[in-house]
Image (spheres, grey):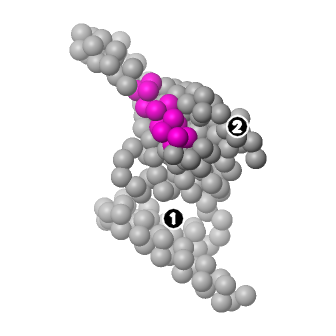
Amino acid sequence: MHTVRLWDLYSSFFRIGGLTFGGGYAMLPMLQREVITKHRWVTEEEVLDIYAIGQCTPGIIAVNTATMIGYRKRGILGAIVATLGEVSPSLLLITALATILLNVQDNQWVQHAFTGIRVAVCALITQSVLTLAKKSLIDIPTILLYLLVVVSTFFFAVSPILIVVFAIFFGLSVQKIKRSLQ
């Protein structure tokens, strides 16, 4: 295993942070291209695990994910550098945009541009969800858990924390049952 250069961590997460609009889920396609396909820092399964942990820990999922991947590759310093890479574009961009948007926020062209951006982000999220589903829904128990979570969140507004805790116990229980049947 080769040592990942800090500059590579910073620049990769700078690109992800700078070219991803719409929140944590929108980063998935670019994250997959950058850290799995291009650099091969982690596998798809590892990204799923990191992303799941990032989802259920406090904070912004994109930052949590960058921090965990940076830590895996270069320890504490890697975590700091990857995190700085992820947040730097937003800090620079939001400072500039806040100034500009205050002056043009009522402009119809600006409003239409944001409508288009939202649609594109929805498509990117859908593509990422389908990719994750192919890797995660691997047997009847995982499909049943998925359906249970969908029903719980859409129809009963169950807390995400309760869902994650339940999913942990569900996964552990299914694994124990599978082992006992072997």
Crowding near the residue tagged with mark 2, few <14, some 14–19, many ≥20 C-alpha atoms within 10 Å:
some
Residue 59 percent coordinates (x, y): 36, 47
Question: What's under tag 1, amino acid-wise?
Answer: Tyr
Q: Earlier in the sequence, mark 2 or mark 1?
A: 2
Q: Is residue 83 visible?
A: yes
Q: Is residue 61 magenta?
A: no
State whether residue 115 is above or below residue 167: above
- Magenta: main secondary structure equals helix
Query: Which quarter of the figure has residue 41?
Result: top right
Which quadrant would the C terminus be assigned to in this image?
Answer: bottom right
Residue pictured at 40% horizontal, 55% vertical = 57
Does residue 132 appear to the left or right of 64 in the view shown?
A: right
Which of labels 2 and 1 is toward the front?
A: 2
Q: Is residue 33 visible?
A: no
Residue pictured at 67% horizontal, 38% vertical = 4
State whether residue 107 is above or below residue 6: above
Does residue 97 appear to the left or right of 82 in the view shown?
A: left
**Residue wearing tag 2:** 39
Q: Is residue 87 magenta?
A: yes
> Which residues fall within the magenta stretch?
77-90
Residue 61 tag number: none
State whether residue 180 is above or below residue 82: below
**Residue wearing tag 1:** 146
